[in-house]
Amino acid sequence: MALITLWRNLCHLSDFRIHRALAALKNHPVIHVHKVAEERLCPWFCSPQAEPLGVRFHHGHSKNFHSENRNDLHPAGEPVFSQAHDWDRPEQSLTSVDEQTFYRRLNSFTSSEEVLSFISCKLQALPDALAAGALQRICEVERKDGEEKLPKEIRKNRVFQALCIRCEQEPSGLPDMVLVTTLQALTLSHVDPHSSLVLSLVAECQRRLKGGGLEVHSLCILGESLIKLQGPGCATLELVMCQLEREKLEEFTPEDIVALYRILQACTEKVGQHQAFLNKLNNFALSVVYSLSPTSMSQILSALVVLDQTQALPLVIKLGKYVVRHIPHFTNEELRKVLEAFIYFGHNDRFFTKALEQHVASVCLTLDPEVVSKVTEYCSRKRILSKPILDAVAETFVCQSEKFSPHQISELIEPFGKLNYLPPNASAFFRKLENTLLTHFNYFPPKTLLKILHSCSLIECHPVNFMAKIFSPYFLQKLQGEESYLDRLSLAQLTQLFLTAVLECPFYKGQKLLPKYRVKSFLTPCSSLETPVDFQLYKFVKIGLVDLLGARLYFAPKVLTPYCYTVDVEIKLDEEGLVLPCTINEDVQQRVALCIDDPNRFSLNTKHLLGKEAMKQRHLRLLGFHVVQIPYYEIELLKSRVELVEYLQRKLFPQKVGVRW
């Protein structure tokens, strides 16, 4: 809270003025003043705005105060206030009152009524700055209660109206920090940006801004308030940014750095003209990461995503290291932003994954569906086969399937297919999914539905009850939408599902996929259902094959089969087991398919094949191929060319002493 940090700015105020607002209350009938004030205040709190940006007031002298973003600020080691205090005596003069004591007492109140009661008998003697502080506290406690705007009874309160009139009529008497934090408090309370009070405060801020007298922290608070009041395109905000860019970053506090990221995040259209400053900011932010709160970390990561700061990977990596210790303290929304950033920048860390596993396994049933789907998306994108996470997610879906939207269900199901993993409760999990799809079939977007069914098929949970529907002309027309043709990925998924129906579900006798919707190859750029063979690994295996078989003539690389799959290396054998030249198609008794599997075909840092690779090998066997897997982790153990040849001999011809060709 700013209220307890502002007193140092006020210590030199010697003129304790009695303002016209209170004079008006004394010299005119109460009803008349109440009516005039109400006419001024009515439009002030009537325009709902977006959620607060979570700005925390800060000052350089407040280092002894705890500054976590979601906690009230309290003086370190200070005793709790007693309700009996000199402030409660109406006859007490304020000319010698310690402003620090006032703010500490004010900050102890938890309702507007307490604040108004506290200052009602002292309002005449309150200096401008303390009156503004009381107004800030009222706005602050009302936001705590989740109100979008100040309640009507507060707006009509005589003391509150007098506070507003004083701030409107005498803004020039407020110190810089008090001025900007008062404007911020009103802004975050969904104030009408065109009210006379706000216009008066904004005008005073503009006057001081043009004079160049505002400090860094005041500029940051003013910048965020202007974004909410006037939008990111306002001219005054440009002036704020120009002054901030001239300041030395070493003079910025960590809170100022975070606020600066939020300001830049709101100005994405102008990111190009601020990129040089952003580069300096990204480099400097590395030095303050250790002191950031969980909220601040998530806000910086979110800003880096919005601003597309792909060159700031060192900052993302360092944030990732410190994020690990804060995972249990993130809100659902903050954790979602962290995961979104790591997905966007392609960052993963085994310590982060371990901490995420522990957190999700313990609280998964209480996480928002959006966070659950984002966790699984993170695992899917990074090929992380995390059994604790996937098991917890499967259990959550069984218990709370009705909470998930079609898109969230798709994000939740896809990792199981991609990572080739069946959870312990697979039977209940897929039964719940099937019931959900049957009940809400028409609510699922066609592409989302196709993605879900294809993911199920990858792990041999074949969606037989839905195949006739998705192969029907009606569904295909919906899938195509208003486009002139279906996208390549959708066609490939449909083709593979149809191939699955033919090969793995021979009992299926329903609607077939029309030939015009079938692709010729699953290995295509940007929409591939196969992983291309690693060139360096293939070159190494090729050397051994030439030595083993005697010539390059006896094997063929990258062979496209009539069934859409591409075989890494094909070897043909006749009925006696002799190796045939790859150009001969007659007398072929056996086709050997070598699958040269590099790390990209496995879950990250495991020997567990991805779902699409497992399906490919399964289908090739059903199509009559003798599938021989050559995984990278076995190749890496070979020390010499002789060992390579012996290895390939054992793999290809385990029953034969020698090979004939």
Image (cartoon, helix red, strand yellow):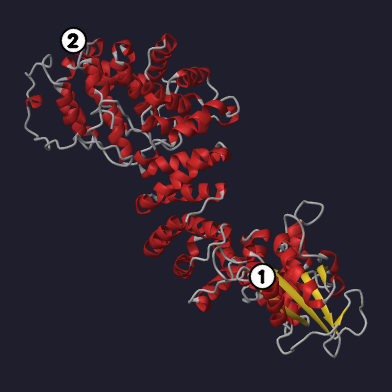
Please say whether residue 44 is visible from this viewpoint.
Answer: no
Q: Depth check: 603 or 499 in front?
A: 603
Q: Which mark is residue 14?
A: 2
Q: Is mark 1 on a helix, strand or loop?
A: loop
Query: Looking at the picture, how far across and down is residue 645, in whole percent?
Result: 72, 76
Q: In this view, does 571 lie to the left or right of 341?
A: right
* Quarter of the view holding residue 184: top left
Q: What residue type is labelled 1?
A: Ser
Q: In this view, does 438 lie to the left or right of 518?
A: left
Q: Could you give the CA–CA distance between mark 1 and mark 2, rounded to whole angstroms?
A: 88 Å
Query: Looking at the picture, how far across and down is residue 272, in whole percent?
Result: 60, 28
Q: Depth check: 347 or 117 in front?
A: 347
Pointer 1: residues within 10 angstroms few (<14), some, or many (20+)?
Answer: few
* Quarter of the view holding residue 252: top left
Q: What element carries label 2?
A: loop
Q: Which amino acid does label 2 sit on?
A: Ser
Q: Tag count in the figure?
A: 2
* Quarter of the view holding residue 632: bottom right
- Residue identifier under label 1: 640
Query: Looking at the picture, how far across and down is residue 173, in whole percent?
Result: 29, 11
